Image (cartoon, rainbow, N blue to C red):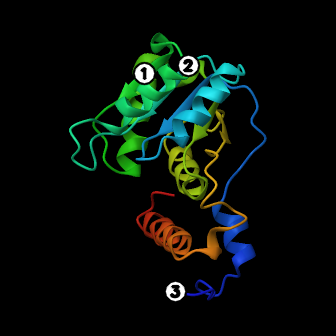
């Protein structure tokens, strides 16, 4: 694709828009979005161990047909990194971001009750958090504060995504998904 502008946006504008990252403050609950990479679990375990949230909800089904839901694989990694299994709730059936959001919102309502939560931390890939945050905000009470704490991958970040064809592809694909979700009224 080369270092072209995306729909008139500069690299800086894309980076500032897409890569959501907040100062990670303690919250009532952490939501970890499924994916094939374990950095999400690494970040969740780090935040748990530092007291940022007492409970985790990990979402993600077997999108890739491996026989193991992403949420189970991420949970195993979190447990290996010191998160007690009884601090983790998993959602095993969703296979895309909107299913992650809808099924997790319902699961949290059932398990914890949204009225009992003041704040949540979202953990996912750095370039995925804008879409996740905006989609989730449509389904939860406005009073619940959403904090984005991206995983700590080094290959596709706010500072370097345009340096590799793979990084560019991931970011441009994510921008297309944001546009699609927005036109469908999901954001």
Compared across the picture, whether 69 is left or right of 138 comes to: left
Mark closer to the observer (2, 3): 3
Residue located at (39% from left, 42% from top): 100
Mark closer to the observer (1, 3): 3
Residue 42 lies, with reference to residue 19, above or below; the image says above
- Numbered disc 1: secondary structure: strand
What's the CA distance linking mark 2 and mark 3?
Answer: 41 Å
Towards the viewer: 144 or 76: 76
The residue indicated by pointer 2 is 55
The residue indicated by pointer 3 is 1
Q: Are marks 1 and 2 in contact (CB under 8 Å)?
A: yes
What's the CA distance linking mark 1 and mark 2?
Answer: 8 Å
Question: Which numbered disc flags the more N-terminal residue, 1 or 3?
Answer: 3
Q: Position of residue 101 (x, y in %)?
A: 43, 42
The residue indicated by pointer 1 is 89
Residue located at (56% from left, 45% from top): 137
Compared across the picture, whether 39 is left or right of 73 comes to: right
């Amino acid at each position: 694709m080369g270092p072209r502008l995306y729909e008139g946006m500069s690299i800086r504008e894309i980076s500032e828009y897409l890569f959501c990252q907040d100062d990670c403050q303690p919250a009532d609950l952490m939501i970890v979005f499924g994916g094939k990479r374990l950095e999400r679990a690494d970040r969740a375990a780090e935040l748990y161990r530092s007291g940022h949230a007492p409970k985790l909800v990990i979402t993600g089904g077997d999108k890739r047909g491996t026989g193991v839901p992403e949420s189970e694989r991420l949970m195993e990694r979190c447990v290996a990194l010191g998160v007690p299994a009884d601090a983790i709730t998993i959602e095993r059936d969703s296979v895309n971001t909107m299913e992650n959001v809808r099924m997790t919102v319902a699961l949290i309502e059932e398990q914890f009750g949204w009225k009992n939560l003041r704040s949540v931390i979202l953990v996912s890939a750095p370039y995925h958090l804008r879409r996740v945050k905006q989609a989730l905000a449509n389904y939860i009470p406005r009073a619940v504060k959403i904090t984005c704490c991206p995983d700590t991958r080094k290959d596709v970040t706010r500072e370097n995504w345009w340096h590799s064809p793979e990084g560019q592809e991931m970011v441009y694909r994510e921008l297309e998904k944001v546009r699609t979700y927005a036109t469908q009224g999901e954001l």
